Image (tube, grey):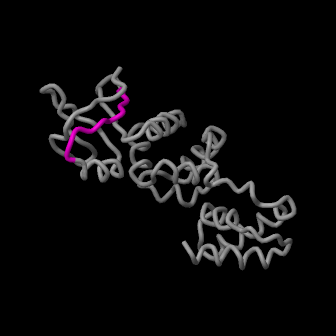
């Protein structure tokens, strides 16, 4: 119903903002990361919105970018993920980070979100992995064909050292040297991780 609302922030509440437009104050639930961004804005802001209608409630959810609202809608398609859980996820991770987590099947990182258990995290990864679209900046296609057979071993070694899957994949993706040695790949990945 409302694609976006443009106005001035009247006040903040725990999980959102009151946005004033034309003498009306719209109560909009907003992810914490968007609230942090909005707090620095003195002038009018534009918030992309989704209206959620239930039997006992009508609520507005707002986001700073179109990518955020697309991600929110995708999360809502996952069985067991409601608006509150989706908002909690997007309060913890920026959309580009969340895309990376899902594409790399990083369930360990996803369950750090308050209220998201392992089964829900696994469902999110399973149902959304192929729907993430363009994640080129996190793509690991530059890993040579020769190295792909050892990639899983490197990821396993790095996660064994306490790194997340997404960190491991990103570190491997930054390797430009040609080598078939798993040990060498681990060393090069660790160098990349130390630079982050």
Give the position of the N terminus as an image quadrant. Answer: top left
* Quadrant in the picture for residue 26: top left
Relative depth, front residue between 178 and 76 = 178
Q: Position of residue 49 (x, y in %)?
A: 35, 31
User: Left or right of 182: which side holds 195?
Assistant: left
Which residue appears at 66% of the width and 40% of the height? 130
Which residue appears at 58% of the width and 53% of the height? 100
Does the magenta portion include 51? yes
Give the position of the C terminus as an image quadrant. Answer: bottom right
Q: Position of residue 68 (x, y in %)?
A: 44, 41
Q: Height in image: 138 above or below 44?
A: below
Relative depth, front residue between 40 and 105 = 40
Q: Height in image: 125 above or below 182?
A: above
Q: Residue furthest left?
A: 23
Q: Height in image: 179 above or below 33?
A: below
Does the magenta portion include 21? no
Which residue appears at 64% of the width and 44% of the height? 129
The segment highlighted magenta reads 42-52
């Amino acid at each position: 119903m409302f694609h976006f609302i443009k106005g001035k922030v009247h006040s903040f509440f725990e999980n959102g903002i009151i946005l004033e437009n034309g003498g009306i104050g719209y109560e909009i639930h907003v992810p914490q990361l968007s609230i942090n961004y909005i707090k620095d804005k003195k002038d009018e802001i534009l918030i992309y919105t989704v209206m959620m209608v239930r039997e006992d409630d009508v609520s507005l959810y707002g986001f700073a970018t179109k990518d955020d609202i697309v991600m929110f809608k995708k999360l809502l398609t996952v069985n067991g993920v409601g608006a509150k859980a989706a908002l909690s996820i997007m309060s913890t991770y920026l959309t580009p980070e969340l895309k990376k987590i899902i594409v790399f099947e990083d369930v360990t990182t996803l369950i750090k979100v308050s209220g998201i258990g392992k089964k829900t995290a696994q469902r999110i990864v399973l149902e959304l992995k192929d729907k993430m679209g363009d994640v080129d900046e996190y793509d690991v296609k530059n890993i040579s064909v020769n190295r792909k057979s050892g990639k899983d071993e490197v990821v396993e070694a790095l996660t064994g050292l306490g790194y997340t899957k997404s960190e491991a994949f990103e570190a491997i993706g930054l390797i430009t040297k040609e080598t078939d040695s798993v040990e060498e790949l681990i060393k090069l990945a660790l160098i990349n991780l130390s630079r982050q």
